[in-house]
Amino acid sequence: MISVYGGFISYQANVDANGNNILGDAANECPISVDPTDLNKMTIAWRQFNDVTSNFRQGGWGYTTDGGVHWTFPGILQNNVFRSDPVTKSDEVGNFFYLSLQSNVQQSFFCDDLWRSTNGGQTWTEQSPDRGAGGGDKEWFTIDKTAGPGHGFQYQADDGINCSGGGVQFQRSTNGGVTWQSPITIPNGPRYGTLDVDTNGNLFIGGWSGGTTFYCERSSNAQIGGQTPTFDRSTAVSLGGTIVQGGINGVGLCGQVFLAIDRSGGSTNNNIYMLASVEPSGRSTTDVMFVRSTDGGLTFSAPLRINDDGINPTKWHWFGTFSVAPNGRLDAVWYDTRNAANNTDSQLFYSYSTDGGVTWSPNVAVSAAFNPFEGYPNQNKIGDYITIVSDNSGGNVAYSATFNFNPNRGQHEEDVYYVRVSPSGGATPTPTATASATATATATPTATATPTATVTPTATPTPTPTSTPRPTPTPRSEPTPRTRPTPPPRPLGPRSQ
């Protein structure tokens, strides 16, 4: 199943063994990872609702070996295990890791498990026992790929609703995710944000602390395995607004905080960047806002709006996310309603920067419009985030959209799509990796008694999709945007995962 728009081709990832849509399911929240040694190999994880009338979801994923043209959906990590909030990362030698929140239908606990794939995402082995990775709700994690003492260390942070029962917390694994050290409370409680490591091995966490205040937290000793990590630098950051829950995304967030660091070795090396879709003061819709630090997180620039359609109080620019390419280019994507007469139908938009985020290219729509209110599973949202991973010539995007029509429900349904974006203004072939990784991978211990994940259904390699583009769906008439509920006081509590 494909959707073509303006030279950009979106390929569906959650497909059956014949490459066709699976009618009646729902899939959203889709992180993507790319093998840096073979950029044609990628994996996307997602929340898999096998039945849209149920609140039960599991840890789904798909993989590709040809740059995203064909996707295989083997099934789920564990049959009949309630999972949510998937995150994937790759190390520098092409191992994929999948951090998954485990709970139950009653959501009586929130603990994480880490899985590893050594064959491009075809199969996964659980590294930590169930709930053994600690963590909690809306966990994010990163891997130290530097050649320093922390090489191979894995770091995760959650939003304060977690396995240990208190506080926005950080955890570290020094053995490839097999075991995790006791959680440490992060100063200022930054949540809904990501982590990254600079070329010196310093760890940075960016997140929202409530209201219009965001924080960038640094640990310079997390890379020292014999020391308990401490946070030695805290910097308050303004992104020009506040995080929103509700609005155009039902019960979900309209954006999270993404932090990424430039490791290009050039003039912008070790710049720290933060981006989020936020609601500015006096508004009820969101803009994509960006800041940067050129001094190791001591100070940050004034917030810069990336969406270039001006201040428009009726338009949404939501689910903003970005990535830093190895050559220092920044790629940002988000959902955007600027072309929608009803102010709700959304398109995926793209912009890039080649000067460290000082200026950004004109925004370009890279997908057809879709109705984000359709296809709701029992839980009314299209997830809480989308993701992008960049290489030197373009970016690989995983996003959810409602292009497929379900006649049994009389509406479109949520599915996961891959699209490649690039500064050339159209889709480009995925390039071959230009150089081998310079660091030697730390051997990752193998979990002892964990079998390869049971998959459902068994999939064969998907055939070449039809060359006839899928017709763009006719937009349904929609009411004006629903009133956004006032965000509850901090903490927001579980986001229904």
Image (cartoon, rainbow, N blue to C red):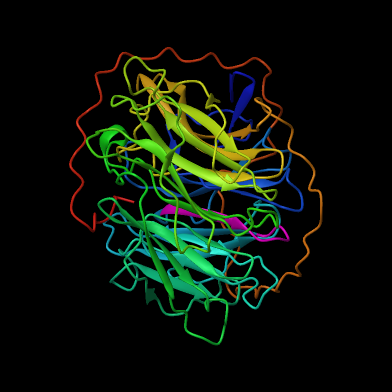
Residue at screen point 37% across, 64% down = 136
Q: Nearer the viewer, residue 475 or 487?
A: 487
Is 233 on the left or on the right of 35, as rendered?
left
Q: Nearer the viewer, residue 69 or 328?
A: 328
Residue at screen point 45% across, 72% down = 171
Residue 125 vertical position relative to residue 14 in the rendered view, above or below: below
Dividing the picture into quadrants, the one containing residue 70 is: top right
Dividing the picture into quadrants, the one containing residue 192 is: bottom left
Q: Position of residue 283 (x, y in %)?
A: 25, 34
Determine if the magenta segment contains residue 419: no
Q: Nearer the viewer, residue 21 or 310?
A: 310
Q: Position of residue 27 (x, y in %)?
A: 45, 39
Q: Residue furthest bottom?
A: 226
Q: Position of residue 293 (x, y in %)?
A: 50, 56
Q: Nearer the viewer, residue 170 or 374?
A: 170
Is 52 on the left or on the right of 124, as rendered?
left
Q: Position of residue 60 (x, y in %)?
A: 51, 47
Residue 218 vertical position relative to residue 54 in the rendered view, above or below: below
Is residue 472 among what the camera can see?
A: yes
Dividing the picture into quadrants, the one containing residue 382 is: top left
**Where does the N terminus fall, quadrant-wise?**
top right
Residue 380 vertical position relative to residue 434 in the rendered view, above or below: above
Is residue 51 among what the camera can see?
A: no
Q: Which residues are magenta?
A: 84-95
